[in-house]
Amino acid sequence: MRQLTFVEAGRVEWQDASDPELTAAAGALVRPLAVARCDIDLPMAAAGLFPGPFPVGHETVAEVVAVGAEVSRHRPGDRVLVPFQVSCGACAACRAGRFGGCRTYRARVGAASGFGQSGGGHGGAVADLLAVPAADHMLVSAPTSVPPTALATLPDNAVDGYRAVGPQLQQHPGADVLVVGGAVPSVPLYAVAFAVALGAGRVRYLDSDAARVEAARAVGAVAELHEGPWPRRFEPAFITVDATGDPDGLAAVLRSTEDHGFCTSVAIYFGAATPLPLLDMYTKGVTLHVSRADSRRLLPEVLPLVAGGRFDPLAVPTTIVPWEEAARAWLEPATKLVLIR
């Protein structure tokens, strides 16, 4: 088969590889129909964050090709979403619903497709075939009414945007939301779109990128361009989302969170130390949540919003590119890139 492979910083190419084999009775083989590029995929490939070579891609909607003897929920021909994190569904963490913390599948950066050996060596989605373990648990049935280009955005970035505002708005309906972008292209825009769809109060978006500001405005946010140094705080909101990727930006967002409010950071901080305004947070009772989205746990919450027409992931600027052009497009700028067969 062919798979799009990260070779070294700034270089991805199609390479031939052996077809994955269906060796586990609980596993499945799927054929990706569309794959979205995650916000971290571009810097991973451009800068070489993890050692190559390895096949890329971890946001996919696929067709089931073959299933093991123990698989009962899925059959060849089914359309499915593949959560980007790999989990077993049976360990203590999975039984507790913490699939992102699966104890069976572990890796240096977390077990996931598209990260090479750093992610456990589970293959990449921009390929003719992808092997999926624990298929009855892992695979999520995808509605045929939603186009593959929209479905492909869900397993990571759209779900990440949802987890930053959705559970909080369930507990606090109508709360105001502040999203501050800067380093992360699509996730904060998905957060804005979900906040609007879920009936948040005032939804505000700040970013140094004029195109993303306009995109946030188009999906219903009060959006403003922020330039220059970070202020001590912005006008506060009960639910805040940090996508700045800058420790000073994170501190400003935390200080902008109302008393006993919730701040979720969807950015990744690679530095050894990221100072936090802990005294401000302590005094105001602010909760900060930092993690990757738990894809398998949250996909069933997001899918009905998409299938029911309440949330359209394609409202976020999406560049759709034919599959054969993947090697060229993977390293080009785009708020959200989707490859389609």
Image: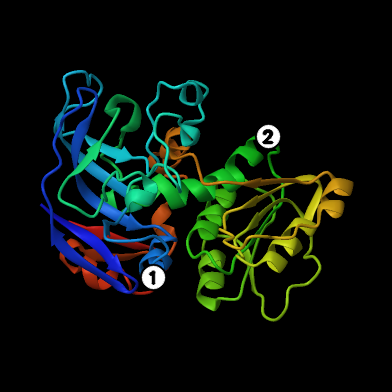
**Drawn side of residue 169 relative to residue 10, left or right:** right
Considering only vertical position in the picture, is 80 above or below 316? Answer: above
Q: Are marks 1 and 2 in contact (CB under 8 Å)?
A: no
The residue under the point 28% across, 41% down is 145
**Drawn side of residue 112 relative to residue 56, left or right:** right
| Residue 58 seen by the camera | no
The residue under the point 19% across, 61% down is 323
* Label 1 sits on residue: 334
Residue 168 is situated, as x and y percent measured from the top left of the image, at: 65, 40
Corner quadrant of residue 247: bottom right
Corner quadrant of residue 210: bottom right
Provide the secondary structure element on which disc 1 rests.
Answer: loop
Residues packed near mark 2 inside 10 Å, few (<14), some (14 to 19) or many (20 plus): few
| Residue type for callout 2 | Gln
Q: Residue furthest bottom?
A: 228
Q: Earlier in the sequence, mark 1 or mark 2?
A: 2
**Drawn side of residue 25 relative to residue 287, left or right:** left
Q: Nearer the viewer, residue 186 or 251?
A: 251
Label 1 to label 2: alpha-carbon separation: 34 Å
| Residue type for callout 1 | Ala
Provide the secondary structure element on which disc 2 rests.
Answer: helix
Nearer the viewer's eye, disc 1 or disc 2? 1
Q: Which mark is residue 171?
A: 2
